[in-house]
Amino acid sequence: MKYSVITGASSGIGYETALAFAARGKNLIIVARRIDKLEELKTTIHKINPQLDVIICTADLSVTDEAYILYNKLKGYEIETWINNAGLGESAFVADQNLSKVETMLRVNIESLTILSTLFVRDYADQEGTQLINVSSALGYAIVVGSITYSASKYYVSSFTEGLAKELELNGAKLKAKVLAPAMTETEFAKNATDLDHFNYKENLPMYHTAKQVAGFMMELYDSNAVVGVVDQNYEFKISNPIYPIIEV
Ligand code: NAP
């Protein structure tokens, strides 16, 4: 039995990605803090395919120890794909940003993603058919004033993952590392980033994707040999070679 792990599966892109993997007949390990949402997802998956094994794991990935505990809990499963999707934003000018929220964001977006990526690479670098997909953002390739710290956290995700992909290639590893960089997507993300009770995408944005569309981009990247899948300024999804310059020593 092989499994695909998706962090941040309780809503938005992670939720729809879990459904897309389920449609491919993949057993799933779904991770987030909200167990009720994960149980709802498991029920929905079993309506699509009752044969699939779906493991629910709760973890607060803003707590460093919980990233290690999560990984160790999953040691007994054979994992073919690991998707670090959990993440959050902070929409504010730097001087005005909520530092407690920023600390949480940096721990989830950067620290836990780095810990989980490293542990997965250690165990699976030589396993044929394995993939690590880290979810960055279009803001991981272009800075947007008003969300600079979030954007910088996603620059980290993009450069870390592109560099890791190169390192794996140079070492002849079988594991592929990839980075998905969506643009504005209708999820709980904007509401949480702006601390509003509700964010109306239709009224506030000229263009955006649905989470289901982005899950489709995820599958396109998963099926390709490319390292990067990025939504460009015209809201078109492009599979591409690594974007950052890399120095090989
Ligand atoms: P979302 O609907 O808010 O989903 C975020 C997911 O992350 C939820 O499942 C949430 O689960 C999980 N999460 C947040 N904090 C967590 C924590 N401390 N521990 C564990 N899990 C945590 O937003 P989304 O848009 O789908 O975001 C998914 C990814 O896409 C993020 O990395 C985001 O940066 C990226 N992205 C989003 C957009 C966009 O416009 N929506 C654009 C580009 C990139 P719980 O709350 O249940 O823990």
Image: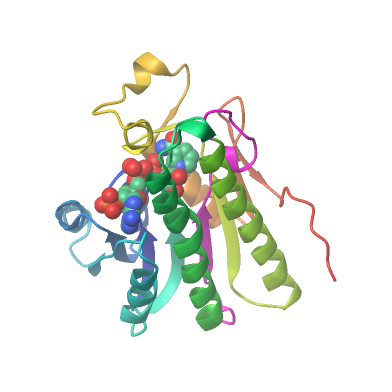
- Residue 234 placement, left or right of 119: right
State the image coordinates of residue 49 (x, y, percent, origin top left): 22, 59
Decide if residue 85 is in sight here. no
Q: Residue at x 19, y 51 (%)?
A: 37
Q: Is residue 113 above or below residue 218?
A: below
- The relative height of residue 152 versus residue 147 in the rendered view (above or below) is below
Query: Is residue 244 part of the magenta span, yes or no?
Result: no
Q: Main secondary structure of the magenta part?
A: loop
Residue ID at (79%, 58%): 246
Q: Which residues are magenta?
A: 125-147
Q: Position of residue 69 (x, y in %)?
A: 33, 76
- Residue 127, how many percent across, how many down? 54, 80
Q: Quadrant of the C terminus?
A: bottom right
Left or right of residue 151: residue 168: right
* Rendered location of residue 194, percent (x, y): 36, 30
Give the side of residue 96 with respect to residue 195, left or right.
right
Q: Please state if 183 lies on the left or on the right of 48 as rendered.
A: right
The N terminus: image quadrant: bottom left
In the rendered image, the vertical position of residue 83 relative to residue 234, given as above or below? below
Q: Residue at x 83, y 62 (%)?
A: 247
Within the magenta stretch, is there residue 141? Answer: yes
Q: Is residue 194 visible?
A: yes
In the image, 228 versus 143, the foreground residue is: 143
Q: How many marks?
A: 0
Q: Residue furthest front?
A: 95
